[in-house]
Image (cartoon, grey):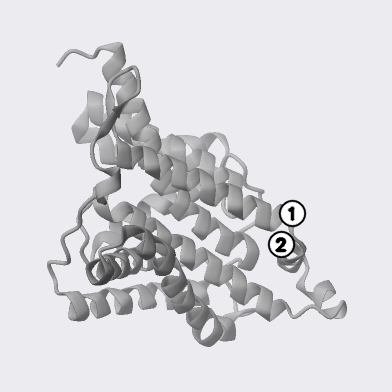
Amino acid sequence: MEFTPSLIALQLVTGIALGAIYALLALGLSLIFGMLTVVNFAHGAFFMVGAFVGLYFMGLTGNFWFSLVLTPLVVGAIGLATERFLVRPLYGRGIDYPLLLTFGLSWVLIEAMRVLFGIEGLPSSTPALLRGSVDLGIGFFPKYRLFLIFATAVVVLALWLFLEKTRYGLIVRAGSRDGDICRVLGIDVSRVWLVVFGIGTAIAGLSGVLAAPTRAVNPEMGISVLAESFVVTVVGGMGSLPGAVVAGLLVGIVFSMTSLFAPELAELSIFVLMAVVLLVRPQGFFGKAGLMG
């Protein structure tokens, strides 16, 4: 194979599109950890549930856009119930308790999807409007992968505006920093944490429905994705939202470029990247030292 500049440039854009999914996944994971200090091991399972729910709604309505709006609401509602009835009683008992609970929950969700949709999963396809490719000047690139980049940018911008420019976003940030002071001021911190967990899981569900046309949808799809999203979260810095976006794109590019030059090392490359980053900067790109303590 001849590695022309156009081929390398197209592979770079492919990496950015892949990194967009990683960034979205890590964004939800980092939001929950950064605000609640909960390591959500069910995040990959929520991603998988989002993919199944999205395909189910598309099968019912034949409308991808309807599914794209409704799926995060459904998965977010599951996240709200998870926080309220399962995670909330474990606050204050140490970081291990929610971790173990969400790890067990992930397997419950996997088995539930196997019962509802079967072991083989469901077939998926690209929505008609986003089929085909466009000429970027360096070559033709799939429309749907460009849409993934655009959708991720919209979600990142919306989340930033919510956290930085709204009164409730200010309350969310304040509640994550000092819950006791917020209670003194009359703020219901438990409701804030509920909303944060719901938003984080909704983003995971959105990631699942967006990723469905690009990969096989089956009950185990969240397992490998969880490992990759944790790599992104660690590289970017635990709890850092800017870190999740930057690291997600970087991991996608590293995976894509390695796939071009040494396909057999593609999976390994992202873990090598994580090891190198941790050796140089143990808290990740944008993380704060001692956050896990």
Q: Residue at x 64, y 79 (%)?
A: 92
Spot occupied by residue 116 in the image (x, y as percentages of width and height): 21, 80
Amino acid found under the numbered disc labelled 1: Lys
- Work out whether 156 lies above or below 183: above
- The quadrant of the picture occupied by the C terminus is bottom right
Visible residue check, residue 119: yes
Viewer-proximal residue, 164 or 277?
164
From this view, report whether residue 57 is shown above or below residue 215.
below
Which residue is outermost to the right?
Answer: 185
Q: Secondary structure at mark 2?
A: helix
Residue 275 seen in the current view:
no
Q: Is residue 30 left or right of residue 134?
A: right
Instruction: Point out which mark residue 169 bears.
Output: 2
> As drawn, is 118 to the left or to the right of 206?
left
Q: Is residue 35 left or right of residue 51?
A: right
On screen, residue 63 above or below 115: above
Q: Residues within 10 Å of mark 2 (few under 14, many from 20)?
A: some
Q: Residue 74, percent across and down?
A: 42, 74
The picture quadrant where one finds residue 264 is top left
Residue ID at (37%, 50%) = 228
Q: How many marks?
A: 2
- What is the distance, in whole Å, between disc 1 and disc 2 at their CAs? 7 Å
What residue is pinned by disc 1? 165
Residue 43: which numbered mark, if any? none
Query: What amino acid is at disc 2?
Result: Gly
Q: Tell me whether circle 1 and circle 2 mark residues in contact (CB < 8 Å).
A: yes
* Residue 292 image point, x, y percent: 60, 59
